[in-house]
Amino acid sequence: LTGTLLMAATLKDFDRLSVRIESQGAIGGIIAEATKDGTVRGYVKNPDAELPPRPDGKFDVSGIVGEGTFYVIRESGFDVGLHRDPYVGSVPIVSGEIGEDFAYYLAKSEQIPSAVLLGVLLQNSDPFVKASGGVLVQMMPGANEHIITMIEDTISHAPHLTSVINEGATPADLARLALGEIPFEVLEEKDVAFRCNCSMERARTLISSLGRAEVESMLSEDKGAVMSCGFCSEVYQLDEGDLEAMLSDEDA
């Protein structure tokens, strides 16, 4: 989620960025969607997947992700009815350590040298995720190679991101962690949030798209329909009247 939010910060209004990881590991796959306004949603295919921790006690991210493919989908005007063909890029998963896979994708598929630091602090109580954060540093065309070397060296000696986040680091602190002594200016600060755009209207549209025969089957056999959003687990229930109205609209 954090990596997708960082990449989405460069989007234009009404655009959406999705990251999809199709993997052979226990988690099965990961999907995240974010927009420029700082909203994100996502889910894993197998939320009950478990692996023992690594020898150092940390969560075995690469082990639970496994081998597979890393996809990025950029959609333009998705929320204002423009329906342009999306751009889809993909690379093999190189490590399963999500930050490294983001950086590899940006370098290989979009030809942008990038440094990506991602961290998430987990705990054994609710909520399972105590804190998370990240940094994305991208090189502008013509960037001084000496600056690039300095950033790479700074990042290689930086403390673990999770410990810094747990100590209450601000976004500016995280930028300083990656940039070291290189001066920078904060241009904008923005709140981020997990927010799902599912709705009853979207649920009706999806059920209607299944075709008349399927809707009639739901009506006769189940006396209604139930849909659960994969992103936020919101449940939408349609009764007999809803399905009958759907069929009547098709006849009109």
Image (cartoon, grey):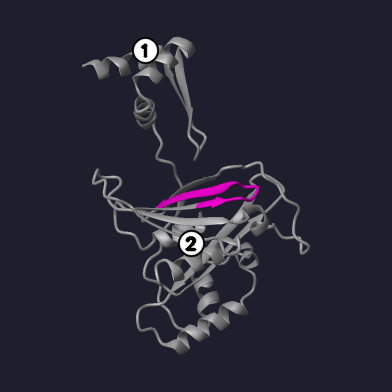
C-alpha distance separating marks 1 and 2: 47 Å
Q: In this view, which residue lies farthest toward the top?
A: 220
| Residues rendered magenta in the picture | 21-34
Decide: is 158 above or below 109: below
Decide: is 183 above or below 49: below
Q: Quadrant of the C terminus?
A: top left
Which residue lies under the disc numbered 2?
91
Q: Secondary structure at mark 2?
A: strand
x and y, in percent, of residue 148 in the image: 47, 83
Q: Secondary structure at mark 1?
A: helix
Q: Residues within 10 Å of mark 1 (few under 14, many from 20)?
A: few
- Residue 27 in magenta stretch: yes
**Amino acid carrying mark 2 in the image:** Val
Which residue lies under the disc numbered 1?
241
Q: Residues within 10 Å of mark 2 (few under 14, many from 20)?
A: some
Q: Nearer the viewer, residue 196 or 99?
A: 99
Q: Main secondary structure of the magenta part?
A: strand
Q: In this view, which residue lies farthest toward the right?
A: 55
Q: What label does residue 225 carry, if any? A: none
x and y, in percent, of residue 34 in the image: 42, 52
